[in-house]
Image (spheres, rainbow, N blue to C red):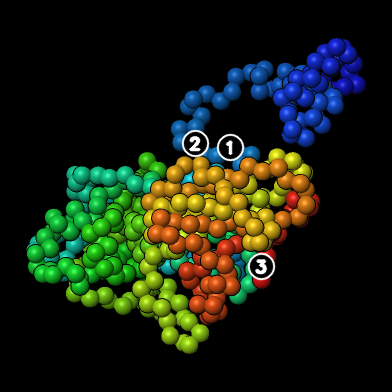
Amino acid sequence: MSESSGKHSPSRRRFLTSVAAAGAGAVAAGAARAAGPDPLITEVQDWARATGDGVDATPYGLPIEYEGDVIRRNVEWLTADTISSINFTPIHALDGTITPQGCAFERHHSGAIALKKEDYRLMINGLVDQPLVFSYADLERFPRQNHVYFCECAANSGMEWAGAQLNGAQFTHGMIHNMEYSGVSLRTLLEEAGLGAAGDLKDKWVYVEGADASSNGRSIPMEKALDDVLVAFKANGEALRKEHGYPVRLVVPGWEGNMWVKWLRRIEVMDGPVESREETSKYTDTLEDGTSRKWTWVMDAKSVVTSPSPQAPITHGAGPLVITGLAWSGRGAITGVDVSMDGGKSWQPARLAAPGQDKALTRFYLDTNWDGSEMLLQSRARDSSGYVQPTKAQLREVRGLNSIYHNNAIQTWWVKANGVAENVEVS
Ligand code: MTE
Ligand code: CO
């Protein structure tokens, strides 16, 4: 019903106005709506005239069509082809900390393979008392654990080393996801094979590889292998999706995503690292003097404001504004996040939605009253080791400009008075 249909009595209109105004409080949009009767309130809508879909309509649910833009996206010039490829989590559009598998970034070196549980085999060999092969059903019979961890590709934010480039948190920081994994501790499986043959474990390594053509082989020091590494088969309660390594992947908490071998096929106990392609020519950082940092496994503390951000502009004008983002550290838990609105000149503490968890994403909020003037919005994370996220200048001073990987610098969004945000750098 429109206003011109004349069915609203003045008294009814006043009533609606006062309800809207009372409910709206300081939020300007609600007050504007109260100017006239709202047919969404006054009229019976189609969805209330008949029954909705039955329970048999959606045996397995997907997001409603109106959320169709909350999807993984590519950066065209980064994705030479879809076999050796990367896409990005839409972190600008998510809340909380858990990443749904359906929009969690993917990185494959030779495409995602379809491997049936029945065809799955995991071999443990090398310096073990008894080389073993496990089927999927075998793995399910070991004591299981559940843990939430983030997985960040070492190349996340890599395009931003030389200057602000990609316009959106999805593209600058979206090579990350955070899921609850269910699986067996790698320690349990190694002990099943027996590590007596390995002798002193201090200088021993495991070499892990996947069943895909790239194999993505990586060396992991024994100390980490026996600490918190998981052989995981469920994520967020359900089977791993094909693109995340179905039926079994390695979870290496806090360490670079490349070590999280998907379609895990073999674990060899060795007396040294293999120095494979993925840990020498790739995933290392070349410094100004031409030497490279070696064994840069741990992902240092990092954070980003996810909204407002270039893909999530402010659309409501001045007044109450929720600033939110994500923080994480491979060295432990996030203990605090500060937010700056003036490019790092002054900071205020954000509110952590929940106490930081070990090697998992932490959601932060700053509930503020925006005066409508432009902001240089930044966030800065601190972790339980005392480490504070560095500025781009601080990071470049140590690493120079040759690096691709391990960029954990503070990100700046220039939020203009009209609410539009842009990726910029402050010096
Ligand atoms: N494992 C195999 N077998 N093959 C791969 O190409 N890519 C690695 C790692 N494990 C890869 C792999 C890289 S570089 C990253 S960042 C993570 O998987 C990404 O995991 P995801 O695709 O589940 O996001
Ligand atoms: Co990666």
Tell me the SS state at disc 3.
loop
Q: Could you give the CA–CA distance between mark 1 and mark 2, rounded to whole angstroms? A: 9 Å
Q: Position of residue 419 (x, y in %)?
A: 75, 50
The residue where tag 2 is placed is: 61
The residue type indicated by label 1 comes to: Ile
**Mark 3 CB within 8 Å of ligand 2:** no
Residue depicted at x 24% and y 52%? 185
Give the side of residue 3 with respect to residue 159, left or right. right
Q: Where is residue 257 in the image (x, y as percent from the top left)?
A: 41, 62
Disc 2, disc 3: CB below 8 Å?
no
**Mark 2 CB within 8 Å of ligand 1:** no
The residue where tag 1 is placed is: 64
Q: Position of residue 158 (x, y in %)?
A: 53, 69
Within the image, what quadrant is residue 204 found in?
bottom left
For label 3, the crowd category at 10 Å Cα-Cα, with few meaning under 14, some 14 to 19 and many 20 or more, is some
The residue type indicated by label 2 comes to: Gly
Residue depicted at x 53% and y 72%? 395
Q: Return the disc, 2 or 3, that comes first in the chain's sequence.
A: 2
Q: Return the disc, 3 or 1, that comes first in the chain's sequence.
A: 1
For label 2, the crowd category at 10 Å Cα-Cα, with few meaning under 14, some 14 to 19 and many 20 or more, is few
Tell me the SS state at disc 2.
loop
Which of the two discs, 2 and 3, sits closer to the camera? 3
- In front here: 145 or 344? 344
Tell me the SS state at disc 1.
loop
Q: Could you give the CA–CA distance between mark 2 and mark 3, rounded to whole angstroms? A: 41 Å
